[in-house]
Image: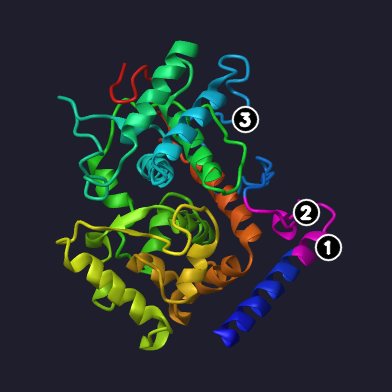
Amino acid sequence: MDKLATVVALYSALQLALACGAAAASAAAQVNKSCVTGAAGAAVSIGYGGAGAGASAGAGVSLGGDAYRSACPLAEEIVRAAVERAVAADPRMAASLLRLHFHDCFVNGCDGSVLLDDNPFFVGEKTAGPNANSLRGFEVIDDIKAELEKACPETVSCADVLAIAARDSVVASGGPRWQVEVGRKDSRTASLQGANTNLPAPTSGVATLVQKFRNVGLSTKDMVALSGAHTIGKARCTTFSARLAGVGVSAGGGTPQGDMAFLQSLQQLCAVSAGSALAHLDLATPATFDNQYYVNLLSGEGLLPSDQALASAGPSAAARADEDVAGLVAAYAFDASLFFDDFASSMLRMGRLAPGAGTTGEVRRNCRVVN
């Protein structure tokens, strides 16, 4: 592990030095926030222009940081207080609320469609394979929306509630803070097929993960950074059973030191539960949003096959990607502030995913049904 730590440190230092040098060399270049060391939980200042490369709002949606400043000045405070109460009562809820935003944005953009219940006109997304008996936190969103409707009726969209709650869940867990862009509209329909097709599976390999993110306009770097959301939360044995069968071991077929003991502990957990037991995605700091997830991957202790695959991406996989996946894992494991900055930037980019042109929306009074 000493040799590995040295390699990671040298690689990360070189990458960071190159990035900082490139930014300083051009007078027109924007400040590279990765060059600024910050503490865990510190605010990350990211301008809209600086985080703009990649996905766009589209569909005529104009996002900004002050859409509710006059129309509903207490909106963010209402969401924050509700999220803090929910996480205090159930620390796992932070990961659940963050995941709701992910699963919303990857299906026809960030439009609140994941919150819709089935109705006579369409089957919603809640019963899709990646969501059924898995997504949770709907009642928390219901409570937040009810408070917002009392304070400022028909003003704050359910899609924006998801985006703000996701940020506040990260902050409540010790992660970075960023200014959420708001102004989204809620869809009047949902897509079961989209949820079954667009969302990455826990058994996905790197090539599949890269393609799933590219399909919605996000980069390989976004994929690696956003995967860091798995630093909090839990997963059922059924989602990592392939990991126990040997999938996701390190490149070259070897088993990193400590990996076998980790897998054996998971096997014991799952053997007595018929696959229903829950395991922490990050065993070391399960309720803290930090970079431990990436440290775990370097030790062969990623829970999901799709997680461990990031650290096992060989040269052929990296050649097909626009970023060195394993290199990013090492860089984030070495530098928590770099991970925080990149995660916040990628959350902003993901938050800009929107329905296609011509799609109309509304501000739902009840997040479960159209007006």
Q: What residue type is labelled 2?
A: Ala
**Whether residue 248 can be seen here:** no
Q: Name the residue under label 3.
A: 65
106 within the magenta span: no
Q: In which quarter of the image is the N terminus?
A: bottom right
Residue at 45% over, 80% down: 314
Foreground mark, 2 or 3? Answer: 3
User: Which residue sits at x=41%, y=39%?
Assistant: 109
| For the residues bearing labels 2 and 1, Cβ distance under 8 angstroms | yes
What is the C-alpha distance between the residues marked 3 and 1?
Answer: 31 Å
- In x, y percent, where is residue 211? 40, 60
Check residue 25 in the rendering and tell me which mark sits there, or answer none.
1
- Horizontal and vertical percent for residue 230? 43, 57
Quadrant of the image occupied by residue 13: bottom right
Cα gap from disc 2 to disc 3, whole angstroms: 23 Å
Residue 260 shows in this picture: yes
Q: What element carries label 2?
A: loop
- According to the picture, the residue beneath numbered tag 2 turns out to be 29
Where, by quadrant of the figure, is residue 271 drawn?
bottom left
Provide residue 337's location: percent of width, then percent of height.
Answer: 65, 58
| First in sequence: mark 3 vs mark 1 | 1
Q: Which amino acid does label 1 sit on?
A: Ala
From the viewer's perspective, is 12 left or right of 242? Answer: right
Q: Using the image, determine if residue 180 lies above or below residue 206.
A: above
Specify start and end residues of the magenta stretch as a single range: 20-40
- The count of marks equals 3
Residue at image location 37% in from the left, 16% down from the top: 365
